[in-house]
Amino acid sequence: MTTFTPTSATEVLEAVRWAVSEEAPVEIFGHGTKRAIGRPAQTEHAIDLSKLTGVTLYEPEELVLSARAGTPMAEIEALLAEHRQELAFEPMDYGPLLGGVAGRGTIGGVLAANLSGPRRLKAGAARDHVLGVHAVSGRGEAFKSGGRVVKNVTGYDLSKGLAGSWGTLAVATDITFKVLPAAETETTVAVRGLTEEQAAFAMAAAMGSSAEVSGAAHLPETVTGKVIDGELKGLASTLFRVEGFETSVAYRVGSLNRLLSSQGEIEAIGPEASRRLWRQIRDCEPFSIAHAKPLWRVSMTPSQGHAMVMALRMRAAADVFYDWQGGLIWIQMETDPAAELLRGLIAAHGGGHATLVRAAPPVRAAIPVFQPQPAALAALSARLKEQFDPKGILNPGRMAG
């Protein structure tokens, strides 16, 4: 087994060209925090990007940051915090959820997995903030797409095309993201005791209001005590985050309280606890303890999620909580991942997709980890793979058998 640890884009290019010449499939990873997502690796060789590090450009006034693909997110977030800036899509950290440690995910992994957090419903995901990328295709060819400015016109944006490809199309070496000023303060409004159906209506009302909610989540009673040191223990919690300048936040929180006053008991969670709470929701911390239990990440129409979950609970033991106004559902199964059952119920409730985030390797090898694509989309994906990686050397089989 050969493992390449390149420290420059040139060395990445040489490693990929070796793999192409030998027709030797390679696994691509950084610190491996998301290595257990997808089908098990089917390679004897690897390209380890953990040494390809460093911020190469940061212009706070221009709201632009560039870094090499293996740069840890913890380093980038610390640098941005010094200038009261952030990646607005608040990418989640999969490390603890998969039995690892926090803070070791890389900026290359953020793009490859198209990560996002609770602010997804307002700010979008990684693909909506990437400005440019340098990469090496599976043909052994270096290319670049986009640039280092917010306004950029370069034809088809390949950098967005690489988002969510999980390293199966190209090896990114340098990435440029748009950054934004961090909010001055934040407050979370918690409505206690709602059922999951009531929470869906409350979240829809809040998102349709003028309160400019930047996070909307619902933690059922079984989950609500597992965040911010048990401070919310007891009744279910429907949560709304309001961010911005202090006077604006106070006004909008008051508006939200009036809107939701008839729904149930309302509590206010201050800035420090609010930030911890939404980081824990972002990283799915309530389900990070039970490392042996299968975990699904489901995306579907927010108004249909609670009905789908109710139907699932009639057939299987599952614990859940909701983010993105109910459009993202984390589902922890007690035993069998129940892939066909879950995906069948999602289809029956308006459609969506389910990704098996956590399961033992034999399970991940036996069932489709990512949502199977319709025939037309699968054919398009195959043509895209053929163009970027005709010999199938980059992370083969990770996304599909």
Image (cartoon, grey):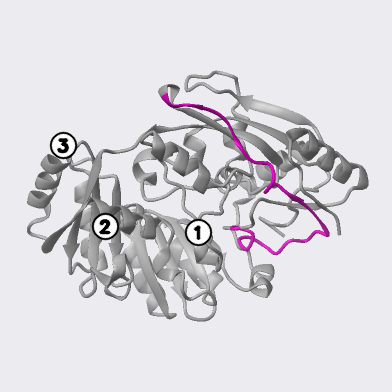
Considering depth in this image, is 170 or 87 the residue closer to the camera? 87
Secondary structure state at the residue bearing disc 3: helix
Separation of residues labelled 3 and 1 (CA atoms): 33 Å
Question: Label 2, on which residue?
Answer: 273
Q: What is the chief secondary structure element of the magenta stretch?
A: loop
At horizontal 8% and vertical 56% (from top left) the residue drawn is: 261
Q: Amino acid at mark 3?
A: Ser
At horizontal 62% and vertical 63% (from top left) the residue drawn is: 36
In the displayed structure image, the side of residue 389 where residue 306 appears, left or right: left
State which region is magenta: 33-60
Q: Amino acid at mark 2?
A: Ala
Separation of residues labelled 3 and 2 (CA atoms): 19 Å
Question: Label 1, on which residue?
Answer: 102
Residue 96 location in percent, x, y?
A: 50, 64
* Label 1 neighbour load within 10 Å: few <14, some 14-19, many 20+: some
Decide: marks 3, 2 in contact (CB < 8 A)?
Answer: no
Separation of residues labelled 2 and 1 (CA atoms): 19 Å
Residue 248 image label: 3
- Residue 379, located in which quarter of the rendered image? top right
